[in-house]
Amino acid sequence: MMQRAKSALSDKWLTAAVGTLIYLIIMSAAGTIAIGDYIIGGPMSLGYILFLMCLMQTGRDNYDLLFVGFRNFAQTLVAGCLSLLAISIGTALLIVPGIIAALGFSMTFFIMADDPNITGMDALQKSWNMMNGHKADLFCLWLHFIGWILLALLTCGIGFLWVQPYMTAATYNYYRRLRYGSF
């Protein structure tokens, strides 16, 4: 999955980095407001996934896709708020329940990207069911990025402009394997 992600992003790293920069700037600005993450986290997450999917599949740099999640604002708001709330509560109780919640709801916006008519609640439920018995596999995939994450931290965070799309693309490949049996 990582190799395919790297291959799908080859020759597109700069475009992926620019899209990631736009996404991270908006998310960081939203984080300065008390509930900003809750309000725009869902729409921006869906938009970022759609942007990367388009880049990986067609090679086109359609930055407008970063904001497509706002077209279905109510459903992406519900999905984003409820997943972030569950992860936050799980993390506050003990770290492990927060990680389990994050893994369980990790496919929500990939599902919404595949089916634009699905409700936020249905996408959350579908993600949780899809990840049943597969959370450890995804956790192991994410652990493979520890070295890249540490390297990105050593660059004062600049490396995340490349690590974030790489990790999201690998997670997208994992989603496709779960959902369709191949990527």
Image (tube, rainbow, N blue to C red):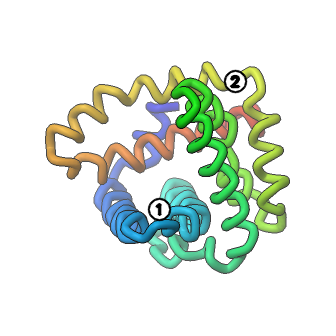
Q: Nearer the viewer, residue 151 or 52?
A: 151
Using residue 148 as the reference point, say whether residue 111 is left or right of it.
right
Upstream in sequence: badge 1 or badge 2: 1
Q: Which label number is shown at residue 59?
A: 1
- Crowding at label 1, few (<14), some or many (≥20) Cα neighbours within 10 Å? some
Residue 20: image quadrant is bottom left
Q: Position of residue 67 (x, y in %)?
A: 54, 75
Check disc 1 and report its element: helix, strand or loop: loop
The quadrant of the picture occupied by the C terminus is top right
Residue 19 in sight from this viewpoint? no
- The residue singled out by tag 2 in the image is 134
The kind of residue tagged 2 is His
Q: Name which residue lies at 36% across and 48% down.
A: 10
Residue 154: image quadrant is top left
Q: Position of residue 27 (x, y in %)?
A: 42, 65
Q: Which label number is shown at residue 157?
A: none
Q: Name which residue lies at 82% across and 62% down.
A: 119
- Crowding at label 2, few (<14), some or many (≥20) Cα neighbours within 10 Å? some
Using residue 59 as the reference point, say whether residue 160 is left or right of it.
left
The kind of residue tagged 1 is Gly
